Image (cartoon, rainbow, N blue to C red):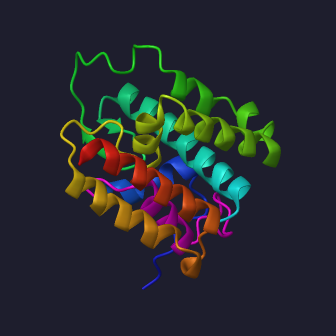
Amino acid sequence: MNDDLDPNLDLAEQVLQLLQAAPDGIAEYTLIQQLKDRHSGHVPNLPLADKLVLFRTHFLLFNALYRLRERLWQEQTHLLEISPLCIRLLPYQPGNAALSERDALRDYYLDMSNLQGTDERDVERLLTSFWTRMQGGEEKQAALELFELANERSLDLPRIKQRYRQMVSEHHPDRGGSTERLQSINLAMEILERYYR
């Protein structure tokens, strides 16, 4: 059986197929891996350990997600929930104002000049800015963002440790991750342990 995605479909349509097969939702990382495993020609089939490759892959996916969300909303078929931890299709609910509000992330990802104009130095600056916030008064929030837990309402240390183990597994150098990323994950865990003991 051939599990490859139809190369004639654009990335948004390929993503829709994968989301329809995952009714409980899917994490961004898993979605990227599925696109690569099924030979989507729309995402770079390169190791995500390279910061620029990771940024470009993330950007292309989120551009497709926001385009898909708007299309499904206009067709009144689904509401697409977008977050790095869980991307999922929800039933359309008329009267929901979610897409009428200004969304800075949507604007960013739909502007392709943000992809084309971002080079390795820019990605490094984004990461440096993130870690500067980590060292400042926003360290807890930055650590939660790194763990993709910033939007979870009820959060405790066991949940944080579970996420930590997942991230270490995903980003360990033995699995193609980078030592720098692993060090960042470990630092974030140290910070969160101080707040959630």
Residue 119 seen by the camera: no
Dominant secondary structure (helix, strand or loop) of the stretch shown in magenta: loop
Quadrant of the rendered image containing residue 169 = bottom left
Indicate yes or no whether the magenta region holds residue 41: yes
Q: Nearer the viewer, residue 194 or 82?
A: 194
Q: Is residue 43 above or below residue 177?
A: above
Q: Could you say where residue 101 lies in the image, as x and y percent from the top left?
A: 41, 13
Tell whether 18 sits left or right of 52. left
Q: Is residue 17 above or below residue 79?
A: below
Q: Nearer the viewer, residue 73 or 132?
A: 132
Quadrant of the rendered image containing residue 17 = bottom left
Q: Could you say where residue 38 lies in the image, as x and y percent from the top left?
A: 52, 72
Image quadrant in which the N terminus is located: bottom left
Tell whether 55 sits left or right of 134. right
Residue at image point 70% right, 62% down: 50
Q: Could you say where residue 196 lies in the image, as x and y percent from the top left?
A: 26, 45
Residue at image point 56% right, 69% down: 36
Residue at image point 56% right, 52% down: 11
Q: Is residue 133 above or below residue 190?
A: above
Q: Nearer the viewer, residue 11 or 122?
A: 122
Residue at image point 37% right, 50% down: 85
Quadrant of the rendered image containing residue 162 = bottom left
Indicate yes or no whether the magenta region holds residue 93: no
Q: Could you say where residue 135 lies in the image, as x and y percent from the top left?
A: 56, 38
Q: Is residue 99 above or below residue 188?
A: above
Number of numbered discs present? Answer: 0
Q: Nearer the viewer, residue 1 or 129?
A: 129
Residue 145 seen by the camera: yes
Magenta region: 21-47
